[in-house]
Image (cartoon, rainbow, N blue to C red):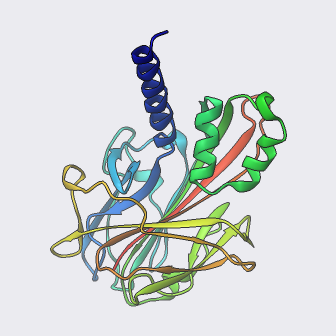
Protein backbone atom coordinates (compact mmCIF):
# COMPACT_ATOMS: atom_id res chain seq x y z
CA UNK A 1 0.00 0.00 0.00
CA UNK A 2 1.50 3.36 -1.02
CA UNK A 3 1.67 6.41 1.25
CA UNK A 4 -1.33 8.14 -0.37
CA UNK A 5 -3.56 5.06 -0.10
CA UNK A 6 -2.54 4.62 3.54
CA UNK A 7 -3.41 8.27 4.29
CA UNK A 8 -6.82 7.87 2.64
CA UNK A 9 -7.50 4.72 4.68
CA UNK A 10 -6.50 6.44 7.92
CA UNK A 11 -8.68 9.46 7.11
CA UNK A 12 -11.64 7.23 6.24
CA UNK A 13 -11.20 5.27 9.48
CA UNK A 14 -11.06 8.51 11.49
CA UNK A 15 -14.21 9.78 9.76
CA UNK A 16 -16.00 6.50 10.46
CA UNK A 17 -14.96 6.65 14.11
CA UNK A 18 -16.12 10.26 14.42
CA UNK A 19 -19.48 9.42 12.84
CA UNK A 20 -19.98 6.49 15.19
CA UNK A 21 -19.14 8.54 18.28
CA UNK A 22 -21.34 11.38 17.05
CA UNK A 23 -24.14 8.82 16.90
CA UNK A 24 -24.33 9.04 20.69
CA UNK A 25 -26.72 12.00 20.39
CA UNK A 26 -28.11 14.27 23.03
CA UNK A 27 -31.89 14.25 23.33
CA UNK A 28 -34.16 16.94 24.75
CA UNK A 29 -37.74 18.15 24.99
CA UNK A 30 -38.48 21.51 23.39
CA UNK A 31 -41.54 23.70 24.11
CA UNK A 32 -43.39 26.21 21.96
CA UNK A 33 -42.16 28.74 24.55
CA UNK A 34 -40.48 28.62 27.96
CA UNK A 35 -42.99 30.62 30.04
CA UNK A 36 -46.74 30.41 30.47
CA UNK A 37 -49.73 32.07 32.13
CA UNK A 38 -53.21 30.70 32.66
CA UNK A 39 -55.01 30.04 29.38
CA UNK A 40 -51.88 29.82 27.23
CA UNK A 41 -51.81 27.03 24.65
CA UNK A 42 -48.50 25.16 24.83
CA UNK A 43 -46.96 22.42 22.74
CA UNK A 44 -43.81 20.31 22.94
CA UNK A 45 -41.67 18.31 20.58
CA UNK A 46 -38.44 16.36 20.99
CA UNK A 47 -35.08 16.83 19.35
CA UNK A 48 -32.03 14.65 18.95
CA UNK A 49 -28.61 15.83 17.83
CA UNK A 50 -25.11 16.86 18.82
CA UNK A 51 -24.01 20.24 20.06
CA UNK A 52 -27.61 21.29 20.87
CA UNK A 53 -28.31 21.46 17.14
CA UNK A 54 -30.95 18.81 16.73
CA UNK A 55 -33.48 17.42 14.35
CA UNK A 56 -37.12 16.88 15.30
CA UNK A 57 -37.85 13.38 16.52
CA UNK A 58 -41.28 11.83 15.79
CA UNK A 59 -43.43 10.57 18.65
CA UNK A 60 -43.48 6.79 19.07
CA UNK A 61 -45.94 5.53 21.71
CA UNK A 62 -44.46 2.02 21.61
CA UNK A 63 -41.10 3.48 22.69
CA UNK A 64 -42.61 5.66 25.42
CA UNK A 65 -42.72 4.53 29.03
CA UNK A 66 -44.09 7.87 30.24
CA UNK A 67 -44.84 11.38 28.99
CA UNK A 68 -46.27 13.36 31.89
CA UNK A 69 -47.20 16.96 32.56
CA UNK A 70 -46.66 18.05 36.18
CA UNK A 71 -48.58 21.29 36.61
CA UNK A 72 -51.63 22.15 38.67
CA UNK A 73 -52.18 18.39 38.57
CA UNK A 74 -50.63 15.40 36.82
CA UNK A 75 -51.65 14.80 33.21
CA UNK A 76 -50.76 11.83 31.00
CA UNK A 77 -49.70 13.36 27.68
CA UNK A 78 -48.89 10.01 26.11
CA UNK A 79 -52.58 9.18 25.69
CA UNK A 80 -53.09 12.07 23.28
CA UNK A 81 -49.85 11.53 21.33
CA UNK A 82 -50.06 10.58 17.65
CA UNK A 83 -47.65 8.00 16.30
CA UNK A 84 -45.19 9.62 13.89
CA UNK A 85 -46.24 13.21 14.71
CA UNK A 86 -43.49 15.77 15.28
CA UNK A 87 -45.64 17.66 17.77
CA UNK A 88 -45.68 15.34 20.78
CA UNK A 89 -48.35 17.03 22.88
CA UNK A 90 -50.51 20.16 23.16
CA UNK A 91 -52.41 21.53 26.17
CA UNK A 92 -53.85 24.69 27.73
CA UNK A 93 -52.15 25.95 30.91
CA UNK A 94 -54.52 25.75 33.87
CA UNK A 95 -52.63 28.44 35.78
CA UNK A 96 -49.40 30.42 35.84
CA UNK A 97 -47.54 28.08 38.16
CA UNK A 98 -45.34 26.61 35.44
CA UNK A 99 -45.04 23.07 34.17
CA UNK A 100 -42.51 20.26 34.37
CA UNK A 101 -42.74 17.74 31.52
CA UNK A 102 -41.04 14.35 31.93
CA UNK A 103 -40.35 11.69 29.33
CA UNK A 104 -38.95 8.19 29.79
CA UNK A 105 -38.34 5.94 26.80
CA UNK A 106 -38.06 2.20 26.42
CA UNK A 107 -34.67 0.73 25.52
CA UNK A 108 -33.24 0.84 22.01
CA UNK A 109 -30.28 -1.36 21.04
CA UNK A 110 -27.13 -0.10 19.35
CA UNK A 111 -23.77 -1.66 18.53
CA UNK A 112 -20.50 0.20 17.90
CA UNK A 113 -17.12 -1.03 16.73
CA UNK A 114 -14.75 -1.36 19.71
CA UNK A 115 -12.65 1.76 19.11
CA UNK A 116 -15.73 3.90 18.49
CA UNK A 117 -17.41 2.55 21.61
CA UNK A 118 -14.35 3.25 23.77
CA UNK A 119 -14.11 6.79 22.36
CA UNK A 120 -17.79 7.37 23.15
CA UNK A 121 -17.30 6.12 26.73
CA UNK A 122 -14.44 8.58 27.24
CA UNK A 123 -16.45 11.45 25.72
CA UNK A 124 -19.32 10.85 28.16
CA UNK A 125 -17.01 10.39 31.15
CA UNK A 126 -18.02 6.76 31.74
CA UNK A 127 -14.71 5.89 33.38
CA UNK A 128 -15.86 2.75 35.21
CA UNK A 129 -16.96 1.15 31.94
CA UNK A 130 -13.68 2.17 30.27
CA UNK A 131 -11.80 0.46 33.12
CA UNK A 132 -13.97 -2.66 32.93
CA UNK A 133 -13.38 -3.02 29.18
CA UNK A 134 -9.63 -2.35 29.53
CA UNK A 135 -9.30 -5.49 31.66
CA UNK A 136 -10.28 -7.54 28.59
CA UNK A 137 -7.78 -5.78 26.30
CA UNK A 138 -8.22 -6.78 22.66
CA UNK A 139 -10.94 -9.25 23.74
CA UNK A 140 -13.31 -6.47 24.79
CA UNK A 141 -15.02 -6.60 21.38
CA UNK A 142 -17.69 -4.24 20.03
CA UNK A 143 -19.91 -2.22 22.31
CA UNK A 144 -23.35 -3.84 22.54
CA UNK A 145 -25.62 -1.42 24.34
CA UNK A 146 -29.25 -0.59 25.05
CA UNK A 147 -30.00 3.08 25.73
CA UNK A 148 -33.01 4.81 27.32
CA UNK A 149 -33.93 8.48 27.63
CA UNK A 150 -34.95 10.27 30.85
CA UNK A 151 -35.75 13.83 29.75
CA UNK A 152 -37.21 16.79 31.64
CA UNK A 153 -38.42 20.20 30.51
CA UNK A 154 -39.21 23.19 32.73
CA UNK A 155 -41.65 25.81 31.46
CA UNK A 156 -41.33 28.72 33.89
CA UNK A 157 -44.08 29.79 36.26
CA UNK A 158 -44.66 30.93 39.82
CA UNK A 159 -44.71 27.56 41.66
CA UNK A 160 -41.08 26.62 42.36
CA UNK A 161 -41.95 23.21 43.79
CA UNK A 162 -43.10 22.01 40.39
CA UNK A 163 -39.54 22.42 39.07
CA UNK A 164 -37.70 20.86 42.00
CA UNK A 165 -39.92 17.86 42.82
CA UNK A 166 -38.45 14.43 41.82
CA UNK A 167 -40.36 12.60 39.08
CA UNK A 168 -39.13 9.07 39.86
CA UNK A 169 -37.28 8.26 36.62
CA UNK A 170 -34.34 5.79 36.73
CA UNK A 171 -31.75 8.51 36.06
CA UNK A 172 -32.90 12.00 36.92
CA UNK A 173 -31.45 15.50 37.09
CA UNK A 174 -33.24 17.24 39.98
CA UNK A 175 -32.94 21.06 40.06
CA UNK A 176 -32.22 22.29 43.58
CA UNK A 177 -32.97 25.85 42.45
CA UNK A 178 -35.66 27.03 40.06
CA UNK A 179 -33.99 26.74 36.63
CA UNK A 180 -33.28 30.02 34.90
CA UNK A 181 -33.57 32.31 37.94
CA UNK A 182 -29.85 32.73 38.72
CA UNK A 183 -26.43 32.54 36.98
CA UNK A 184 -25.78 29.04 38.24
CA UNK A 185 -27.97 26.00 38.75
CA UNK A 186 -27.54 23.47 41.52
CA UNK A 187 -28.68 20.00 40.49
CA UNK A 188 -28.66 16.56 42.06
CA UNK A 189 -28.30 13.46 39.91
CA UNK A 190 -30.25 10.45 41.18
CA UNK A 191 -29.84 6.87 40.04
CA UNK A 192 -32.79 4.70 41.10
CA UNK A 193 -33.62 7.31 43.72
CA UNK A 194 -30.11 7.51 45.20
CA UNK A 195 -27.39 10.14 44.67
CA UNK A 196 -24.94 9.27 41.90
CA UNK A 197 -21.39 10.45 42.59
CA UNK A 198 -18.66 11.11 40.03
CA UNK A 199 -20.94 11.42 37.00
CA UNK A 200 -20.09 13.88 34.24
CA UNK A 201 -22.65 16.67 33.84
CA UNK A 202 -22.39 18.83 30.71
CA UNK A 203 -24.35 21.89 29.58
CA UNK A 204 -25.01 23.65 26.26
CA UNK A 205 -26.69 26.96 25.47
CA UNK A 206 -28.52 28.36 22.43
CA UNK A 207 -29.97 31.80 21.81
CA UNK A 208 -33.73 32.28 22.15
CA UNK A 209 -36.09 34.02 19.74
CA UNK A 210 -38.36 36.81 20.99
CA UNK A 211 -40.93 35.74 23.58
CA UNK A 212 -38.70 32.98 24.99
CA UNK A 213 -39.32 30.79 21.95
CA UNK A 214 -36.67 28.17 21.01
CA UNK A 215 -34.78 28.75 17.78
CA UNK A 216 -36.11 26.66 14.89
CA UNK A 217 -34.40 23.42 13.90
CA UNK A 218 -32.93 24.86 10.70
CA UNK A 219 -31.53 28.01 12.32
CA UNK A 220 -29.62 26.58 15.28
CA UNK A 221 -25.87 26.87 15.77
CA UNK A 222 -23.65 23.83 16.18
CA UNK A 223 -22.11 24.47 19.59
CA UNK A 224 -20.06 22.40 22.00
CA UNK A 225 -20.71 21.99 25.70
CA UNK A 226 -19.54 25.05 27.61
CA UNK A 227 -19.75 23.38 31.04
CA UNK A 228 -18.37 20.02 32.22
CA UNK A 229 -18.50 19.18 35.93
CA UNK A 230 -18.56 16.00 38.03
CA UNK A 231 -21.15 15.25 40.70
CA UNK A 232 -20.07 15.23 44.34
CA UNK A 233 -20.56 12.38 46.83
CA UNK A 234 -24.17 13.49 47.42
CA UNK A 235 -24.88 13.55 43.66
CA UNK A 236 -24.90 17.34 43.53
CA UNK A 237 -23.22 19.63 41.02
CA UNK A 238 -23.17 23.37 40.50
CA UNK A 239 -23.67 24.17 36.81
CA UNK A 240 -22.74 27.70 35.70
CA UNK A 241 -25.43 29.14 33.39
CA UNK A 242 -24.08 32.68 32.88
CA UNK A 243 -25.67 33.46 29.53
CA UNK A 244 -29.28 34.19 28.72
CA UNK A 245 -30.79 31.66 26.34
CA UNK A 246 -32.01 28.08 26.10
CA UNK A 247 -30.04 25.60 28.21
CA UNK A 248 -29.56 21.84 27.98
CA UNK A 249 -28.02 19.97 30.92
CA UNK A 250 -27.13 16.32 30.33
CA UNK A 251 -25.73 13.29 32.17
CA UNK A 252 -25.23 9.63 31.19
CA UNK A 253 -24.98 6.52 33.37
CA UNK A 254 -24.13 3.01 32.18
CA UNK A 255 -24.47 -0.32 33.99
CA UNK A 256 -24.16 -4.01 33.01
CA UNK A 257 -27.21 -4.94 30.96
CA UNK A 258 -30.15 -6.80 32.43
CA UNK A 259 -30.67 -8.37 28.97
CA UNK A 260 -27.31 -10.06 28.41
CA UNK A 261 -28.49 -11.94 25.35
CA UNK A 262 -29.27 -8.61 23.68
CA UNK A 263 -26.67 -6.21 25.07
CA UNK A 264 -23.71 -6.03 27.43
CA UNK A 265 -24.50 -2.56 28.77
CA UNK A 266 -27.58 -0.47 29.58
CA UNK A 267 -27.19 3.31 29.38
CA UNK A 268 -29.54 5.96 30.67
CA UNK A 269 -29.45 9.54 29.34
CA UNK A 270 -30.85 12.25 31.61
CA UNK A 271 -31.52 15.74 30.25
CA UNK A 272 -33.04 18.96 31.54
CA UNK A 273 -34.01 21.90 29.33
CA UNK A 274 -35.00 25.38 30.50
CA UNK A 275 -34.56 29.04 29.62
CA UNK A 276 -32.70 31.80 31.38
Q: Nearer the viewer, residue 45 or 178?
A: 178
Asked whether, in this view, residue 69 is left or right of residue 136, the answer is: left
Asked whether, in this view, residue 57 is left or right of residue 262, the answer is: left
Q: Residue furthest right?
A: 135
What residue is at 46 percent from the left and 68 percent from the top?
203
The spot of residue 19 in percent (x, y) is: 45, 35
The spot of residue 193 in percent (x, y) is: 73, 70
The spot of residue 246 in percent (x, y) is: 32, 70
Q: Nearer the viewer, residue 33 or 274?
A: 274
What residue is at 24 percent from the left and 56 percent from the top?
220
The spot of residue 249 in percent (x, y) is: 48, 67
What residue is at 32 percent from the left and 79 percent from the top?
243
Is residue 109 visible to us here? no
What residue is at 58 percent from the left and 45 percent from the top?
120
Asked whether, in this view, residue 265 is left or right of residue 205, the answer is: right
Is residue 214 visible to us here? yes
Q: Nearer the viewer, residue 224 or 30?
A: 224
Amino acid sequence: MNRFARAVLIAASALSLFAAVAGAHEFWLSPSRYRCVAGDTLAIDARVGTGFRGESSPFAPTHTEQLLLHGAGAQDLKRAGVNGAFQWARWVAADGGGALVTYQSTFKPIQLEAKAFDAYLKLEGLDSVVTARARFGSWAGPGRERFARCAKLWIAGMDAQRATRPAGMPLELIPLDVPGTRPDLRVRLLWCGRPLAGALVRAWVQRLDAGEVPVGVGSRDSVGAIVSVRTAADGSARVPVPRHGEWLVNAVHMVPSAARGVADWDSYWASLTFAR
